[in-house]
Image: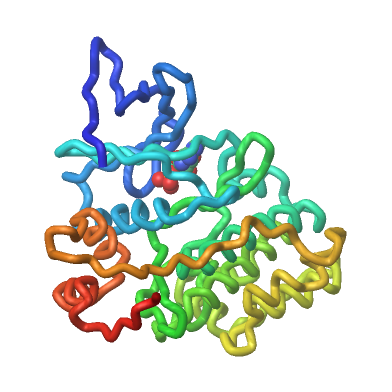
Amino acid sequence: MSKMSHSHRDELYVGPYRLEKTLGKGQTGLVKLGVHCVTGRRVAIKIVNREKLSESVLMKVEREIAIMKLIEHPHVLGLYDVYENKKYLYLVLEHVSGGELFDYLVKKGRLTPKEARRFFRQIISALDFCHSHNICHRDLKPENLLLDEKNNIRVADFGMASLQVEGSMLETSCGSPHYACPEVIRGEKYDGRKADVWSCGVILYALLVGALPFDDDNLRQLLEKVKKGVFHIPHFVPPDCQNLLRGMVEVDPDKRLTLEEVMKHAWVVAESQGHIELELPIGQIVQTSIVPTVEDLDADVLSTMNSLQCFKDKDKLVAELLGRNRSTKKKN
Ligand code: AMP
């Protein structure tokens, strides 16, 4: 992380970016417009007051930074840089001007199936990319989906996201109750990928119907409704899309559609030559070398791995990185 350069005259700068108007306010603090003093590039700067936030929220921010640094995808909000001083963290984010999908939906009431499908494809393409990097979002909802000037989706707010290695299960209960799946609400161990599929199904329902499949003013009643998983789909939703919704918003995680199945579903691929456009293929990154000495270990990398909860026992990890605990087969 770079240090923050301070104000000259009355203007406040974060690195080369001049701080301008406030764009919004989130759980972790203000988001301001930043303008690059040489290129004029506009960015959004999330200002996090370290002193005012609890340890757990700060950990959330650290995790958000670590995860966003890992992901680069056209439909995931980009994190360009992070500046810090003693009091604040400044996240320099890609600036998007279209606001939240939530507000867009409220303004329109509900979307046509065609428009809903366009948004939905962009969301699942971003999600597929995250999942292929073992990252689950865990807080997908229209408030966390931002729009650019061309009405393209940017998935934002990875504060709840988690690294989930294939075959393992997650435990922490997260997400808004309207979008959270029954196994998360019941506090059981769950597969974050399946939890994301449920949330995406609820989002698709909201886009098409302009209402939520499960809703109640009373939180307990709402949780009961989600656990039962009984919901009504209005007649104006096309039949093949109803079938997709039922497959995604399915109480039994074993019966729920996988993201792979969602991406091949007839309603999703309609009018797209049989498959939805996928982003660049993801290369496999394989570490082949062993770190020679403790001094060669990068403290920043270890700290990021800690934020991502990649390991439980630091000493064991260090021993493995130094090659002491592994039976490595040397390649010639
Ligand atoms: P957050 O703290 O991420 O929930 O952001 C709070 C609000 O700031 C959002 O609801 C948006 O209105 C605004 N905002 C956040 N990030 C951006 C961005 N990258 N570009 C434009 N506005 C943003």
Q: Position of residue 245 (x, y in %)?
A: 71, 73
From the viewer's perspective, is 319 left or right of 89?
Answer: left
Q: Residue at x 59, y 73 (%)?
A: 198
In this rendering, is residue 268 above or below 257? above
Q: Quadrant of the C terminus?
A: bottom left
Q: Which quarter shows the N terminus?
A: top left
In this view, 44 is above or below 210: above
In the figure, residue 210 lies in which quadrant?
Answer: bottom right
185 over 2 or under it: above or below: below
- Colour style of the rendered protein structure: rainbow
Taking the image as shown, residue 221 lies to the left or right of residue 165, namely right
Count of numbered circles in the view? 0
In the rendered image, the vertical position of residue 181 relative to residue 156, given as above or below:
below
The outermost residue toward the top is 9
Residue under the image location 25 percent in, 37 percent down: 2
In front of the other: 251 or 151: 151
Which sits in the foreground, 66 or 100?
66
User: Residue 105 appears at what percent x and percent y?
Assistant: 66, 49
Lateral position of residue 135 relative to residue 19, left or right: right
Residue 95 x/y as whole percent:
50, 35
Q: Position of residue 265 (x, y in %)?
A: 77, 73
Which residue is pictured at 81% across the width and 55% down the height? 114
Residue reaching furthest front? 332
Visible residue check, residue 138 = no
Q: Tell me which corner region of the image, top left, top right, bottom left or bottom right, holds residue 20.
A: top left
Work out whether residue 17 can be spotted: yes
Q: Nearer the viewer, residue 96 or 68?
A: 68
Q: Residue at x 71, y 78 (%)?
A: 246
